Image (cartoon, rainbow, N blue to C red):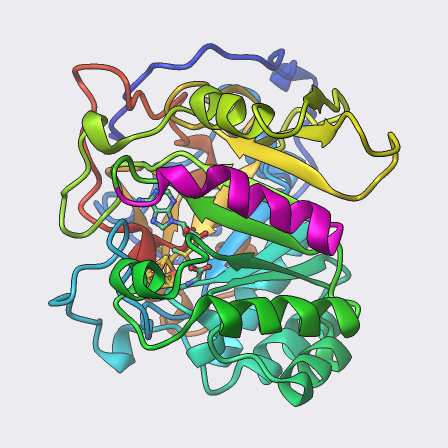
Amino acid sequence: MIQVNGGSSMAVSRLSLPQLAPRAGAPAADRAHAPDCSECPPPAPDHVRAARRMIDSHGRVIRDLRLSITDRCNFRCVYCMDPGVRFMERERLLTTPEIIRVARVAASLGVRKIRLTGGEPTLHPELTEIIGGIRAATDVEIAMITNASRLSRAALREWKQAGLERVTISIDSLRPERFARLTRSTCTPGDVLDGVSMCLDEGLTPLKLNAVLIRGFNDDEAPMLAELARRFGIEMRFIEYMPLDSGRAWDPSKWVAAAETRRAIGARHELVACGDDEASSTARTYRFADLPRDASARIGFIAPVSSPFCGACSRLRLTADGKVRPCLFSTREWDLRALLRGPSTSDDAIAGFLIDATWTKQAGHGIATPEFEQPARSMSAIGG
Ligand code: SAM
Ligand code: SF4
């Protein structure tokens, strides 16, 4: 069924699944799709469906949903989207009511946090309605990740009022000319930093910044980017470049290990491991030795290539066209949109689908293994 790339060690203990007693009247048979459909996940065991939680066959529990609301973007970052990328037809993208419905059902299954992503989520014409709809239907934390090219105080206030709580902003270079080459946009680092200030002023916190370093392109900027953490009192995170670019230009020689980035920053400011990261967190965080222990300025390292964190993964992804991806690196995905658009599909059927899809989540991505297979979709089409 799904491609299991193996790879990472399992850091979490397995749940004792047999202890999850089947609930009377569990919806095991509530599947509004054909049992042999190749785009539908095979049924999870009855006791898993009965638990009404998204649990995978390795004992991991889903608490974090990455909801891609569009595959469109106004940037063409070299590590993500090729200039010639073709976007999906609009009819294929989930509508606002469909997005809100999935969010509501996912929350009923134990999701605690929803991150809106894309593509560039701020390009969505109904972003406020999406945020407001999720807020009205759930009590999950609502976060968003953006390139910050289109932020305004009015928009941020509107989104916050609708229910948005926190924002993560991507910034990969502080040099205007390099930023332009990297993002292939007309936006400037100054525009992004204005966006950072606005988010802080509007209380969309804790705010985090993300940077992807590419060897020979922007890796020399790690110490300068790290200064943003001190300047704004926020967490600056460095994500290892992953083989998820639509141009398939990733190769190990362009990749910069988190440990190397940490050394480069450490040469300017001594870093101390915080040691309080949640097991399921993607980042390992460090504080600055010369700042108070509780200072909000921190550096985070997201190292999926050098230190996979699959063992404690709590994430599930839904693409803008309604495919459930149990793993960022899934080579199989499950078509929830067909179910959503089917005649009189019940919430129970959607819940069952999400539970079944989760059960297929692969153990790890295996990027560093010879068997690794790059997914057909790029990061922008998956939702990072
Ligand atoms: N457009 C928004 C942005 O750039 O913040 C949200 C979507 S973007 C796909 C989400 C995150 O994925 C960004 O922080 C981006 O840097 C990261 N990303 C994209 N391609 C990547 C790659 N090949 N390796 C590592 N991170 C990547
Ligand atoms: Fe767009 Fe974000 Fe991908 Fe850059 S990383 S091309 S901003 S989706």
Instruction: Specify the quadrant of the image occupied by residue 297.
Output: top right
Observer-nearest of 272 and 47: 272
Quarter of the image with the N terminus in it: top left
Residue ID at (53%, 47%): 225
Residue ID at (37%, 24%): 305
Observer-nearest of 297 and 65: 297
Residue 247 is situated, as x and y percent measured from the top left of the image, at 14, 50
Instruction: Specify the quadrant of the image occupied by residue 329.
Output: top left
Instruction: Specify the quadrant of the image occupied by residue 284.
Output: top right
In the rendered image, residue 244 lying in the magenta stretch gets the answer no
Observer-nearest of 65 and 307: 307
In this rendering, does residue 81 appear at all? yes
Report the span colored magenta: 217-234
Residue 143 is situated, as x and y percent measured from the top left of the image, at 64, 60
In this rendering, does residue 109 appear at all? no
Residue ID at (42%, 28%): 304
**Residue 358 placement, left or right of 33:** right
| Predominant SS along the magenta part | helix
Above or below, comparing residue 376 to residue 48 in the picture: below
Residue ID at (19%, 37%): 250
Residue 11 is situated, as x and y percent measured from the top left of the image, at 57, 12
**Residue 86 placement, left or right of 112:** left
Residue 211 is situated, as x and y percent measured from the top left of the image, at 46, 47
In the rendered image, residue 222 lying in the magenta stretch gets the answer yes
Above or below, comparing residue 168 to residue 330 in the picture: below
Above or below, comparing residue 126 to residue 51 in the picture: below
